[in-house]
Image (cartoon, rainbow, N blue to C red):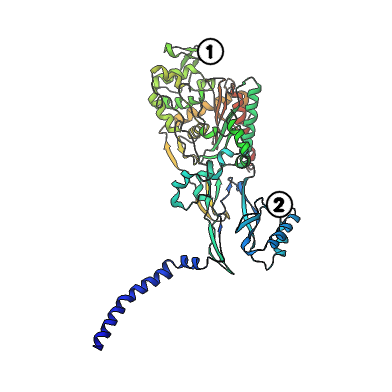
Amino acid sequence: MKNKAHTICIIIMSLLFPVFAARLADWQLVHGEEYRELAAREGTVSVTTEAVRGEILDRSGKGLVTNTAKRKIVIDKTKLSDDEILRLSDIIKSCGDKLNDDLSADGVFTLADDVSRRCVSAVSEQTQGIDGVEVQTYHVRSSSQPTLAPHILGSVGAISAEEYDALSDKDYKLTDSIGKFGIEAACEDELRGKSGRRIISGDSASGTEARRGNTVWLTLDSELQKATATALGENVTAAKNAGADDCESGAAVMLDVSDFSVLAAASCPTYDLNRYSSDGSYYLSLAENEAAPMFNRACSGSFACGSVFKPCVALAALSDGIITPETTIYCARCYDYYPSNVVACMHYHGSENLFTALAHSCNVFFAETGRRLGIEKMSALAEKTGLGEYTGLEIEESRGVLAGRDSESWTDGNTVQAAIGQSDNAFTPMQLATYTATIANGGRRLKTHLVKQITDYSRKEVISKTAPGEICDLGVKQEYIDDVNKAMLMVTQDPEGTAYSEFSDFPVEVGAKTGTAENAGSDHAAFICFAPFEKPEVAAAVIIEHGANTKFAMRTAKEMLRAYFESKPPQN
């Protein structure tokens, strides 16, 4: 019997041991941290340390959106007497710092924000050996030049319920902030970082440290951006003072032809990014402003562009054999092939070929060329150059409107209007700059981009770099591209060229095209260009909305080019 009982005991123990072992493992390994936290809850403080958001820099490392370290006094009222809190409050006030309004809060709370170094020293000295007082560092985010590029940089705001639901798998909290638009939104994953948590129990502390967000380097040149914004604003004002009473706005863009990086992108009117983020009444005034200063005209504004579309028509017609550089078309100031779509020209030009027609911006030449070419071939090449297409930007942009492709109805007569940049054609300044850079780049269109590279917060480790990516090749013979480029040079160098008055004495040869576009109100003034002519480095596009006279768009571009070339180191 003894042996039988002994055997039964062994069997029972053999069955129970795995159960006890599994339970012990569950207590210690699976839920150990949870149970330790529960056991230590009395007298334990849990402190969340927020991640420092990554900074945004220009191409050379100058700060565009940066963080400023500040200090605050945090107390735990459960560990301090009323007299100690009162004495601490008196120390803070004696240093000239302000206490927070709500001192009635229980538990852990902030007694004073943004305290001075003097205050930090005084509090640290007077509270040695006193538990429940802590000086914490936090960061305030702001723009060093808040009106320079707010449309590009964007802002951070409180996460919405919809955003929270969509990002539930990315460890966001309802109290978190998130990028709302611009680079702040486009690079949210890189900029955000990761919060940490400290569990403080008695004299011990444990938990995870916060990880700072990465730093985003933009392709923008802050000095060139400043020169662009200044020139744009001055010429919008000049156009208004010259009689275009409805002229209030415009946009200007410059790209690096070698990689299609955005060197400058200004939208006028602009606004103060710091006040936008912190001043409710200021935001309301922006929202009510009829000039729509918060609208990013450089990337999202689609404008009728007029004759700056003509180089595209010329390139398509040459490529398809519709014309040769020597083909002549007679201009008698009126083109009435389609009586319902009569095209008027600014001058009586007589016989025009490709070079003179582009230099003089002859509507008759391009209306007839467009009629022979047809809208399908015209639109097909326009798409390849980036007109009516997303450019590849990291931030929000409009696709624009391409006549024929995006039109609800079409007649042959509409084609002649499209060929001179009218009809439904409406493009963004960013698209116009991309189109110009594509022609200047031998017909290779690259992805237009604003981000140069991503580094860690310290800026020491490069995490990723943006490599130029080819979107398409126009498939046009280089000789035809050369012909169009030569014709664009004549726009600035021929005494009868439409940009000769502004660029004949410019120290660098510039290929260009002017444009005025009919619309409700004063005409839009448009200008595209690339330089230097022999080996293009930059391409630019300017739209002065309701600017009436192209000279204001030309003068904006000239100042942009001047700023670019004057900033270059002298060549040996």
Residue at x 54% of width, y 52% of height: 214
Closer to the camera in the image, 392 or 496: 392
**Residue 117: x %, y % from top left:** 71, 57
Q: How many marks?
A: 2
**Residue 510: x %, y % from top left:** 57, 30
Residue at x 53% of width, y 45% of height: 179
Q: Quadrant of residue 322?
A: top left
10 Å crowding of disc 1: few (<14), some (14-19), many (20+):
some
Q: Is residue 487 visible?
A: yes
Kind of residue sitting beneath label 1: Tyr
Q: Quadrant of residue 513?
A: top right
Q: Furthest residue to the bottom?
A: 2
Specify which label sits upstream in the sequence, 2 or 1: 2
Closer to the camera in the image, 203 or 87: 87
Q: Identify the image quadrant of the C terminus.
A: top right
Closer to the camera in the image, 568 or 272: 272
Give how far apart the Cα atoms at labels 2 and 1 are.
75 Å
Q: Furthest residue to the right?
A: 94
Kind of residue sitting beneath label 2: Lys
Secondary structure beneath dot 1 equals loop
Secondary structure beneath dot 2 equals loop
Q: Quadrant of residue 256?
A: top right
| Circle 2/circle 1 CB separation < 8 Å | no
Q: Is residue 259 above or below residue 485?
A: below
Q: Is residue 91 above or below residue 545?
A: below
Disc 1 target residue? 348
Q: Is residue 380 above or below residue 66?
A: above
Q: Is residue 564 visible?
A: no
**Residue 235: x %, y % from top left:** 63, 28
Disc 2 target residue? 98
